[in-house]
Amino acid sequence: MPSFVAEIAAASPEVTASYYARKLAFETDCWDVHASLAAGHCDFVLLDVRSPAHYSTSHVPGAINLPHGKMTTHRMSEWPADTLFVVYCAGPHCNGTDKAALRLARLGLQVKVMIGGMTGWADEGFAFEGSPASADA
């Protein structure tokens, strides 16, 4: 009798590879964002989609504050059409990243979610910064 783990057969390696390649097309993690920023290889725009008040208290260094409700065709035209946006919010309990990703995709823009958000960033031990600067200013 198989274990609870093995009672449903695992997917084939080909199906598994396809699944994870597709999943990674939608998301990145805090470590990859941090490593890219630290290396100066920032080929994406990092957007903090929380409120300006939360952003000013603490945010990921290099992030621009832009709540999903402010993502309009006009506002997003400030960046080239092929820009990759990486969005994050408070953490896994917050669906702000999902709303931002949906809005950006509906505007025809490339987007990935930084899984974990602020909680994930803190869990990795990465530093935050606070600033009154905001994209709404």
Image (cartoon, helix red, strand yellow):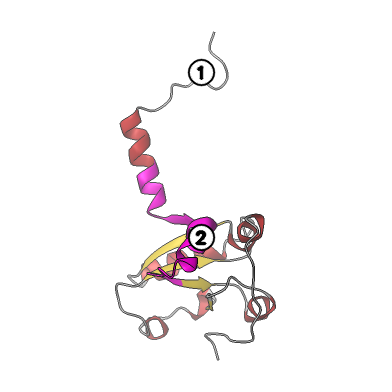
Q: Residue at x 52, y 85 (%)?
A: 135
Return the x and y of residue 101 as percentages of the image width and height. 45, 65
Q: Residue at x 48, y 68 (%)?
A: 37
Return the x and y of residue 85 as percentages of the image width and height. 42, 69
**SS state under label 1:** loop
Return the x and y of residue 126 as percentages of the image width and height. 62, 62
84 inside magenta stretch: no
Return the x and y of residue 92 as percentages of the image width and height. 61, 55
Q: Which amino acid lies under the numbered mark 2 shown in the image of this protein? A: Met
Q: Residue at x 67, y 74 (%)?
A: 58
Given residues 128 and 102, the one toward you in this image is 128
Q: Residue furthest top?
A: 1
- Span of residues in magenta: 20-45
Residue 3, above or below 90: above
Q: Is residue 35 left or right of residue 52?
A: left
Residue 28, above or below 11: below
35 inside magenta stretch: yes
Residue hosting label 2: 114
Residue 94 figure quarter: bottom right
Residue hosting label 1: 7
